[in-house]
Image (cartoon, rainbow, N blue to C red):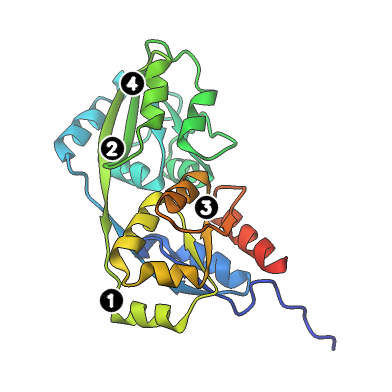
Amino acid sequence: MAPVNPTPLAGRRIGVTRPARQAQTFADALRAAGASPVRVPVIRIGPSPEPEALAAAVARLADYDWVIFTSVNGVEAVDALVSTWSRGRGPRVAAIGPATAAAVEARGGEVAYVPAEHVAERVVDGLDHLRGARVLLPRASRARPALSERLTALGAHVHEVAAYSTVGVRPDAAVLDELRRGLDAITFTSSSTVEHFLEGVPDAGSLLDRTVVACIGPITAETARAAGVRVDVQATVYTTGGLVDALAGHFTD
């Protein structure tokens, strides 16, 4: 029997910095590609810092023309406050990417638009009649202002509400031991994972100098470079699946 050719990621230890409760799908995809995922959660998703404002906005959903979700976390925060998701009634829904759209649809909602490029600014490209439109943005408490600014420039009335918070997690001794064993690559799937890795991991810079650094897309990569971190891999499709493919391509070259 001929030996099976190993995949480019076979045996590679790949760090996953996503929140612990959101890391499973990504870890499974890495494992399916032959890699050994090493969980290094450096953030967790916390509640909204303004729960009354969020509840009030959700109670008035019918008053909006568009609701734009830029993460699954925003969908989950809104879902906790609605009894049912409307299909064909109420505001139209836009989602930043396929995972966020799937989260809406899994809850019975209907997504009108998903941009081809999964970054917040591109969501605007597919929205029509924005002048005078009322737009709800349920986002992270420290979200970048680019999307809100672009919507406002196009004449929309934007209501941005903090639907959840991103809290740094300091790795425990077991996680630090795994890091000291060494990684073949470490992945960052948001700017906050970069920022909190640098804040929470002792000798983070030295560790990153010794491993391949992979980012899910240009915004995350820009955050890393601005902090002095070298970026070796950037996905061309800004999803965790795209990041797995980009890593496989890197280790094939």
Q: Secondary structure at mark 1?
A: loop
Q: Which residue is mark 1?
A: 172
Q: Does label 4 or label 2 sit earlier along the sequence?
A: 4
- Crowd around label 3: few <14 · some 14–19 · many ≥20 (10 Å): many
Q: CA distance from mark 1 to mark 2?
A: 36 Å
Q: Which residue is mark 4?
A: 64
| Residue at 47% across, 13% down | 129
Q: Which residue is mark 3?
A: 216
Mark closer to the observer (3, 4): 3
**On screen, residue 131 above or below 169:** above
Q: CA distance from mark 3 to mark 4?
A: 31 Å
Q: Amino acid at mark 3?
A: Ile
Where does the image place residue 116, in percent across and percent down from the top left? 60, 36
Q: Does label 1 or label 2 sit earlier along the sequence?
A: 2
The C terminus lies in quadrant: bottom right
Q: Amino acid at mark 1?
A: Asp
| Residue at 84% across, 86% down | 2
| Residue at 53% across, 44% down | 98
Give residue 82's mark.
Answer: 2
Mark closer to the observer (1, 2): 1
Where does the image place residue 16, in percent across and percent down from the top left? 45, 66
